[in-house]
Amino acid sequence: RAPLWTAGALRETVRNRPFLIYLLAQIFFMFALNMIMPLSPYIAEVLLGRDVGFASWLGLCLFLGVIVSFVLSARIIKRFGPKRMMVGSVILFGVALSMLALIVPDVPGGEHDTRNVVIAFASLALAGIPVAGFLVATNVLLGQIIDADQATTGANRAAIFFGIQGLATKWVYGFAAAVLAYLFTQYGNSPEGPLGVWLAAPCAAVCCLVSAALYALYPEREVLAHAQSVAPSTPSLH
């Protein structure tokens, strides 16, 4: 039985191939998410020419998408499994962000105004739909990895896995904010210079594409084969 907290146990954990794939996918996804989270007021003011209060309507569209996602999440994960649900969720999120690149900065009543507003609402509503997948499927995947590790090592090292995941993703918050600030400083974040705001969504969409590719590489069958000899840590889907 492997000790829970030793240098060797930590080395084993970071050498766990399925965990590394999962962790890298999480890092790219968290980067994309944290690039977009502060963007709603800038979309409203800079790209759509509205006041900051208009961002609340954009947030409402996102919330409606989230409600839909929670209604459908249990059915989807039972039918397709956590891996495919996560891949699909990240791809859908990336598509939603890519739609924001179709916005042509304009003012209310301008040539592109109606089209821009429709795109913004549709994009954020679509972006809300994968939220339940992010919240549910990631925990299920990590539970699979923990169970497989326990079957191999004889020790439940859930705390190490969650700790390394937390440590590895914490820096992403600051890095995403720094990249967003760089885009704003270098390319502008005002109606007169909107390129920095416009570029944020395509950058985040590319990160979603990388994250989805990594999730697709996650060897779920192999992990489940190792995990089947122990009682599951995976959260119940019922």
Image (cartoon, grey):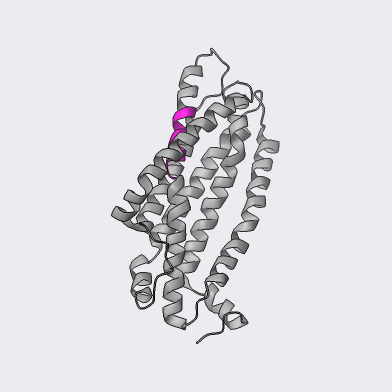
**Which quarter of the rendering shows the C terminus?**
bottom left
Taking the view exactly as shown, the residue that stands out farthest to the right is: 185
Along the horizontal axis of the image, is 71 left or right of 208?
left
Decide if residue 96 is in sight here: yes
Relative to 6, is 194 above or below? Answer: above
Majority SS type along the magenta span: helix
Along the horizontal axis of the image, is 232 left or right of 189?
left
Decide if residue 90 is in sight here: no
Whether the magenta-drawn stretch holds residue 125 is answered as yes
**Residue drawn at the location 53% of the way across and 13% of the way down:** 110
Residue 225 location in percent, x, y? 33, 74
In depth, the one of 49 and 150 nearer the eye is 150
Whether the magenta-drawn stretch holds residue 129 is answered as yes
Residue 235 location in percent, x, y? 42, 62
Start-end of magenta stretch: 120-130
In depth, the one of 20 and 60 nearer the eye is 60
In depth, the one of 134 and 173 nearer the eye is 134
Residue 215 location in percent, x, y? 42, 58
Residue 49, quarter of the rendered image: top right
**Residue drawn at the location 56% of the way across and 15% of the way down:** 108
**Residue drawn at the location 46% of the way across and 27% of the way down:** 119
Taking the view exactly as shown, the residue that stands out farthest to the front is: 238
Taking the view exactly as shown, the residue that stands out farthest to the bottom is: 1
In depth, the one of 23 and 160 nearer the eye is 160
Residue 15 location in percent, x, y? 52, 75
Taking the view exactly as shown, the residue that stands out farthest to the left is: 79
Along the horizontal axis of the image, is 200 left or right of 25?
right
Relative to 58, is 164 above or below? Answer: below
